[in-house]
Image (cartoon, coloured by chain):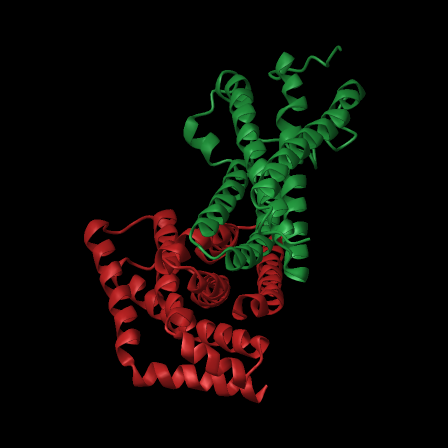
């Protein structure tokens, strides 16, 4: 547990020391939203929600991709002597969830400034965005770990991750309709939330089981 | 063999023996592939990796055939008789699920292609295979059951599991359907074993057992 926090702290500290990556992603969010604003004015509900989730996906690819790529071979060897693979992957996933939550909230703010705000139930939507950001970042943590082992890694993350993330994204888009005042069957919302958290739990368990095989070289 | 004559479906009902069976055997072959991937990670025997990749390849091929037979079926039922637009057909949750399956296995082969080291290729792709299969499962078996659809098996159509529910499949169909599932699966397994045997001969020098 202590080691997980130490690894998490190291990643957060690195983020503060090398601020260019953080600001890079911020700029990425701002410029994509601005491009969207210039190309589409006042999108309707479905377009807004679709664009929002697609942007979340791309932000996640950019923010999370570096989490394994930035660790050089030598540094990985050093971690290998310090911690167990389970601690390492859990710390990475926690860190990615943290950064993705910040990014997705920021993009929500930017979205509501530039693209209008069709969300009727803000607190619900913020919850859904946090859940979605966490789910997406978990999947991409593993994909980043896999892609870091292959040669042309940056492009590979998208190829590997997109088909895998699709079912989750479909569920999230469906769930986010509750925040747009669409009436759902009773219990359907809870069912969706249960399904998404169940999938998240599955991802974490698989990550913990499978990561030791990725890590050994 | 006589078949029930239903409105819209008519004689195209016989496609059940091809279309549904192909998806069944695809899923079974993917399952077999995942089992071999797990076995590979347990002992790092390259033989298991060859099994896993070939079962995945034949499974994807059956998936493409399932798509092809589904297109023919949709052409006679959804397009001609129900006047559905192409847009609404492409948005079918089952079609999306199936597309995800094929994309995932496409990504699996791309991943394999990006390694030069054989052991590393086998290890990393085994990890991806297991992870992807776990994510594939909800997209094929759960999501289509939550959303409305033209395809049998959607909520509200009360057919539950299409072609498995005793209420909506005629016993005359069942007499051919069940053997056909087994037949298509075994055909897939046979093709896979041929490919595996060729690969095992090619890599004879690398496998030491």
Q: Quadrant of the N terminus of chain B?
A: top right
Q: Quadrant of residue A3?
A: bottom right
Picture mark count: 0
Question: Considering depth in this image, is B27 or A182 the residue closer to the camera?
Answer: B27
Question: Considering depth in this image, is A80 or B165 the residue closer to the camera?
Answer: A80
Chain B in the picture: what colour?
Answer: green
- What chain is colored red? A
Left or right, B60 with reference to A98: right
Question: Considering depth in this image, is A125 or A50 the residue closer to the camera?
Answer: A50
Left or right, B196 with reference to A151: right
Left or right, A118 with reference to A137: left
Q: Is residue A127 above or below residue B83?
A: below
Q: Is residue B35 above or below residue B88?
A: below
Give the image location of residue A65, x and y in percent: 39, 65
> In the current view of this chain or complex, which residue is farthest to the front?
B205
- The residue lying at 62 percent from left, 43 percent from top is B30
Q: Is residue A157 above or below residue A127?
A: above
> In the current view of this chain or complex, which residue is farthest to the top?
B2
Give the image location of residue A123, x and y in percent: 46, 68
- The residue lying at 51 percent from left, 24 percent from top is B71
- The residue lying at 49 percent from left, 81 percent from top is A79
Give the image location of residue B127, x and y in percent: 57, 58
């Amino acid at each position: 547990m202590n080691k997980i926090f130490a690894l998490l702290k190291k990643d957060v500290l690195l983020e503060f020391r090398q601020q260019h990556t953080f600001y890079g992603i911020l700029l990425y969010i701002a410029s994509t939203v601005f491009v969207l604003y210039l190309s589409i004015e006042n999108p309707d509900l479905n377009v807004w929600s679709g664009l929002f989730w697609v942007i979340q996906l791309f932000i996640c690819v950019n923010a999370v991709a570096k989490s394994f790529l930035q660790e050089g071979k030598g540094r990985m060897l050093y971690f290998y002597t310090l911690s167990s693979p389970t601690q390492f992957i859990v710390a990475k996933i926690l860190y990615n969830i943290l950064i993705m939550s910040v990014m997705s909230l920021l993009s929500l703010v930017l979205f509501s400034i530039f693209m209008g705000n069709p969300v009727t139930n803000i607190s619900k939507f913020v919850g859904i965005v946090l859940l979605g950001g966490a789910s997406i970042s978990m999947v991409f943590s593993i994909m980043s770990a896999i892609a870091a082992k292959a040669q042309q890694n940056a492009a590979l993350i998208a190829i590997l991750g997109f088909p895998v993330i699709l079912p989750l994204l479909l569920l999230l888009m469906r769930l986010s309709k509750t925040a747009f005042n669409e009436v759902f069957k009773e219990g359907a919302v809870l069912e969706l939330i249960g399904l998404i958290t169940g999938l998240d739990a599955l991802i974490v368990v698989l990550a913990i089981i499978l990561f030791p095989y990725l890590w050994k070289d | 063999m006589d078949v029930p004559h239903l409105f819209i479906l008519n004689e195209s009902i016989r496609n059940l023996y091809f279309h549904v069976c192909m998806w069944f055997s695809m899923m079974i072959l993917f399952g077999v592939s995942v089992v071999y991937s797990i076995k590979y990670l347990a002992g790092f025997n390259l033989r298991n990796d060859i099994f896993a990749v070939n079962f995945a390849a034949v499974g994807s091929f059956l998936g493409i055939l399932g798509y092809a037979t589904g297109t023919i079926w949709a052409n006679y039922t959804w397009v001609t008789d129900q006047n559905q637009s192409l847009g609404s057909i492409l948005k079918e949750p089952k079609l999306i699920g199936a597309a995800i399956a094929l994309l995932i296995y496409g990504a699996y082969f791309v991943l394999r292609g990006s390694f030069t080291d054989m052991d590393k290729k086998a290890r990393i792709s085994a990890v991806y295979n297991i992870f992807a299969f776990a994510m594939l499962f909800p997209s094929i078996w759960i999501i289509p059951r939550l959303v409305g659809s033209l395809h049998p098996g959607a909520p509200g159509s009360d057919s539950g599991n299409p072609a498995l529910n005793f209420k909506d499949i005629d016993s005359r169909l069942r007499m051919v359907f069940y053997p056909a599932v087994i037949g298509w699966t075994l055909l897939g397994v046979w093709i896979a074993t041929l490919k595996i045997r060729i690969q095992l001969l090619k890599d004879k020098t690398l496998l030491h057992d």
